[in-house]
Amino acid sequence: MKSCAQLFSTNYGIWGEKARSVSKYIKPGQPVKMTDSKLRNHTVLVTCFQHEKLVGHAFASVWSFEGGVVGWITQLVVDRNLRRRYIATQLLQTLKLHPLFQRVTAVGLVSSHPAACTALAKYANVDVCAVDLSFIREHAVNVLEASPVDYIKGAQLRGDLFQENSHTGAVSSAFTEFYVDHAEPSKALEQFKAKGKWCLGELLEGHEYLALFPVSPGRALK
């Protein structure tokens, strides 16, 4: 757990300018940190090592909601020096081997990074530019309301899928008050847009993308 907390604290990202509105102890530009005690609340852990060094991990929880069972990625982190090598994709694919994930009917996450959403889309065998937005609109509220994870349960859904005349450019997002700096995610987003491979909209301050995709229980390994 300590190694996972250290990986997160050194590779996840830095706080943005509005982070002070959440806590006076947070300073913009400083790394977003995690402690091993916070990580113990999660349910499933998969890791990736390179030469005995931890270079990636994923934490996940599983819970029932009105309409099915969701496998939710609560944390996905990869060493910044080893990104774009499909480590995140492999971590999520490994979750399919866990007994808890054999019964899920949907997988989801909230993240400020488009690459995390793309890795999750691969889990569901769908291109991130062709996801079923109607599924997100129909089930997101029930999934979040049933969540045992406090910050997920309390997140406010934002974007065209959930608001009329939002005019923000957001399509599927959640206001989690997570004011991480968006410089790196924005660069990745522009690359996805240039390839025509993005449909979840813009990322606003304090928000994270909401990705939620249907999967067939018991068929994840095929």
Image: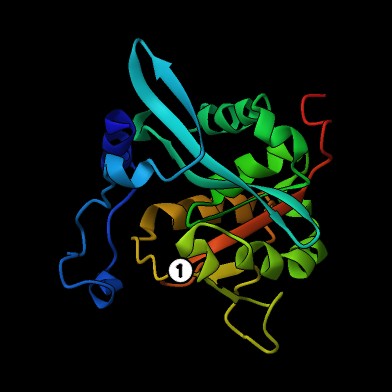
Looking at the rendered image, the quarter that the C terminus falls into is top right
Looking at the rendered image, the quarter that the N terminus falls into is top left
What residue is disc 1 on? 176
- In the displayed image of the protein, which residue is found farthest to the top? 51
Q: How is the image coloured?
A: rainbow
Is 79 rendered above or below residue 211? above
Q: 145 or 20, which is in the foreground?
A: 145
Residue 7 image offset from top left, x and y in percent: 31, 34
Q: 50 or 192, which is in the foreground?
A: 50
Is 40 rendered above or below residue 166? above
Residue 128 image offset from top left, x and y in percent: 70, 49
Looking at the picture, which amino acid does disc 1 mark?
Thr
Horizontally, residue 76 falls left or right of residue 212, namely left
> What residue is shown at x 54% (from left), y 66% (from top)?
153
Task: Please say whether residue 201 is visible from this viewpoint.
Answer: no
For residue 201, what is the image quadrant?
bottom right
> What residue is shown at x 36% (from left), y 35% (from top)?
80
Task: Please say whether residue 2 is visible from this viewpoint.
Answer: yes
Residue 5 image offset from top left, x and y in percent: 30, 38
Residue 63 image offset from top left, x and y in percent: 65, 50
Secondary structure at numbered mark 1:
loop
> What residue is shown at x 42% (from left), y 72% (from top)?
205
For residue 25, what is the image quadrant?
bottom left
> What residue is shown at x 50% (from left), y 71% (from top)?
154
Would you call the spot at circle 1 few (<14 residues within 10 Å), some (14-19), or many (20 or more)? Answer: many
Q: 28 or 187, which is in the foreground?
A: 28
Is 48 rendered above or below residue 188? above
For residue 180, what is the image quadrant?
bottom left
Q: How many marks?
A: 1
Horizontally, residue 200 falls left or right of residue 208, namely right
